[in-house]
Image (cartoon, rainbow, N blue to C red):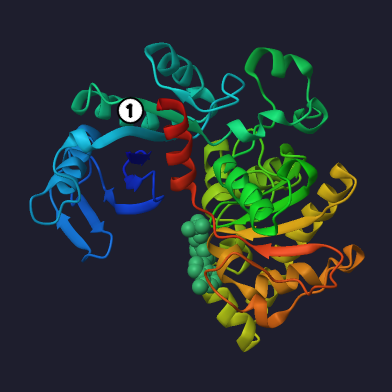
Amino acid sequence: MNILVINCGSSSLKFQLIDSETEKCIAKGICERIGIEGSQITYTPAGGEKEQTVTPMPDHTEAIRLVLEALTNEKTGVVKSLDEIGAVGHRIVHGGEKFAASTIITDEVMKAIEECNDLAPLHNPANLIGINACKKLMPATPMVAVFDTAFHQTMPEEAYMYGLPYEYYEKYKIRRYGFHGTSHSYVSRKAAEVLDKKYEDLKIIVCHLGNGASVSAVKNGKCVDTSMGLTPLEGLIMGTRSGDIDPAIMEFIAHKEGKDIDEIMTVLNKKSGVYGLSNNLSSDFRDLEDGYNRGDEHCIRTMNTYCYRVAKYIGSYVAAMNGVDVICFTAGIGENAPLVRSLVCEHLGFLGVSIDEDANHKRGEEIAISTPDSKTTVMVIPTNEELAIARETVSLVK
Ligand code: AMP
């Protein structure tokens, strides 16, 4: 069965068509600047040329129509008709406490997703627009919602509660939810599979280090803690997000710089992280790695602070699980930056971690980068959120 995976943002829409039998991507692409002048669709059929077309996309329905047209195009399409698309899997950012698993999309489910809009005001409304656009163009095709938060719903109360007045939890559901759940679930399962061990027997820490970044603790196949919270701002230092800070800093900056709360939030989300810490040099680790190797003081400070924070989370999750068997690195930085992995692991001597630097410099493979005598196994597992969404979708529509 072919599954169309849709990841819909407020002005962009990423898509992949995946053959669920071979688990291969047949075609993929992105629509950008939806509703903005200069919108374009990029479409790449597997093994074919990338096509970029600048064309008006006033709304998401038009974007999805163009995606379906590209997939069924006589010359460059990959399917003959829409009948060959068996189901659509939608990535949904926030499922609140309502969704602990993926689900077939019905009117009630859409209403429940809408009720979580408050918790992800930038993302959930865009996700719903994507669902509505698909419903319009493919009314008979079953659709599944796969939530970024669902995998973390197994966290115990002690891990998800904040030290805030309890009434805020009761009234507004303010608690820690966690994100990147599809990736944490996929990578931790894959690690067990590659090691040929039972998922339910392992204590795994997954470091999803991309532009957004989070760590999770997966004990006996269940997430018991993760570093992102009510929103994706908590936890690690990220590309442009601050991660954990003393909340009183917000008031301090507000007074000193004359900023209101929205301006402070923009600083914390868009101007902080490794971008801000490197004195606005870059949010991209390729630049930071170059600078580190050149001896640039801003890059050295940023890299060391970033890696220390990752190591500190790993340490706390060893405590949370009373041990660890496997530490996995994944996502853009986790998969591609050997320097980051090395620097993080330098802090992990207490776990008996020893890294094989030759293995650490290999690319694109599911691989153990620790030496055979390392007390804890360290691995690089490329994530594949689209495949994980396709798998969930098939399992529900079959
Ligand atoms: P993601 O959000 O998972 O797509 O990750 C994107 C981030 O991965 C980029 O912002 C880069 O910082 C990082 N990245 C991608 N490729 C490399 C690379 N070859 N070396 C170091 N960092 C990389």
Residue 39: horizontal and vertical position, in percent? 20, 49
Q: Could you say which is closer to the camera, residue 295 or residue 398?
A: 398
Q: Could you say which is closer to the camera, residue 268 or residue 324?
A: 324
Q: Could you say which is closer to the camera, residue 26 or residue 109?
A: 26
Q: Relative to residue 5, is residue 237 drawn left or right?
A: right
The secondary structure type at the circle numbered 1 is helix
Q: Relative to residue 77, is residue 157 drawn left or right?
A: right
- For residue 276, which quarter of the picture? bottom right
> In the image as oriented, which residue stretches furthest toward the left?
74
Q: Relative to residue 292, is residue 370 drawn left or right?
A: right
Residue 284 visible in the displayed image = no
Give the residue at mark 1.
131
Q: Is mark 1 within 8 Å of ligand 1?
A: no
Residue 154: horizontal and vertical position, in percent? 71, 29
Task: Give the residue at x 58% y 47%.
Answer: 186
Residue 386 vertical placement versus 366 (above, below): above
Please state, as top left, top right, bottom left or bottom right, where the C terminus lies in the image.
Answer: top left
Task: Give the residue at x 41% y 50%.
Answer: 23
The amino acid beneath tag 1 is: Ile
Residue 313 vertical placement versus 259 (above, below): below
- For residue 396, which quarter of the picture? top left
Q: Relative to residue 242, is residue 331 drawn left or right?
A: left
> In the image as oriented, which residue stretches furthest toward the bottom?
294
Image mark count: 1
Residue 204 visible in the displayed image = yes
Residue 144: horizontal and vertical position, in percent? 41, 28
Please state, as top left, top right, bottom left or bottom right, where the N terminus lies in the image.
Answer: top left
- Callout 1 environment at 10 Å: few (<14), some (14 to 19), or many (20+)? many
Residue 156 vertical placement versus 5 (above, below): above
Q: Could you say which is closer to the camera, residue 198 or residue 226?
A: 198
Task: Give the residue at x 69% y 32%.
Answer: 176
Residue 43: horizontal and vertical position, in percent? 23, 55
